Amino acid sequence: MLPSMRLEDKVVMVTGAGSGIGRAVAIAVAEAGAHCVPCELPEKTDDVEGVCAEIERLQRRALPVSLRLPDLDSIELAVDTAVTEMGRIDVLVNNAGVNIPRDALEVEEADWDTVMDVNLKGLFFMSQRAGRRMVNSGGGKIVNIASQNGVIGYYRRAAYCSSKAGVVNLTRVLALEWAPHGINVNAVGPTFILTPLTQSTFDDPALREDLLKRIPLGRVGRPEDVVGAVVFLASPAADLITGHTLLVDGGWTAV
């Protein structure tokens, strides 16, 4: 029998859900039958309201939650609110992330700390707090949005590549430690994805040409290209998969 990729009545928490990949994931899990807790920075509440409207249009529950990574009090409050209002967290999608492109010789301490704080420290403590709740409820799924840049290098991304490499290996560690509790931990590693936040990257003709030359399928990604991998890893169809990073890279890393 074909395993289901439905998420019927699961509660899925998605960080950085106001735009881009996070927004697409929040709507996709609702399309797969889940209720959703879209999380976003307090100053982006308007973006989250739009996401919630889309989720509710699909007749799923939506609970917008403010979250500022890596603030531990904010993380604790977000997780507590999700569990109190929705009853549990079945799936956590760690999507929130930042990038500050700089030549390695020009990276400042503040740049490094900002990228690491959100992409790695915030992701870890979000996973830890949600993981504790999953242990108490008998299991769950965590899907980390890593990057192909977690397994390869690319120019002007010393901090970003380092943070995403950390996510890839942290995914393995959490998978090993939490498997006895019935928690699957996996990651998705997208290639360069065109979103409102990355538009400036693709506005550079030379950079866009370089990226396209490196992707055998001949195009950059869209948020919609990523959501299938996330839903799959969150679903019963992936129950025997843990500690894995699924690359959605158009063939970049196959070269």
Image (cartoon, helix red, strand yellow):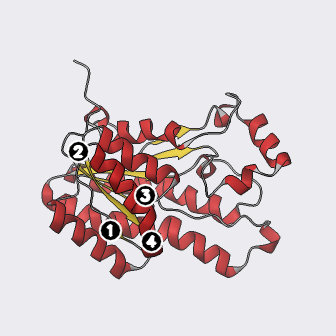
Query: Which residue lies at the image location 43% right of the left edge and 66% below the top edge?
Result: 46
Q: Amino acid at mark 4?
A: Leu
Left-right relation of 208 to 144 = right
* Label whose residue precedes the other's in the sequence (1 or 3): 3
Left-right relation of 205 to 136 = right
Q: Secondary structure at mark 2?
A: loop
Query: Which residue lies at the image location 17% right of the left edge and 60% below the top edge?
Result: 86
Residue lying at the far top in this picture: please name it.
1
Question: x and y percent of residue 152 in the render?
Answer: 66, 48
Q: Amino acid at mark 2?
A: Gln
User: Which residue has dot 4 on it?
Assistant: 41
Cα distance, mark 3 to mark 4?
Answer: 9 Å
Cα distance, mark 2 to mark 1?
Answer: 19 Å
* Label whose residue precedes the other's in the sequence (3 or 2): 3
Point out which mark residue 59 bears. 2
Q: Amino acid at mark 1?
A: Val
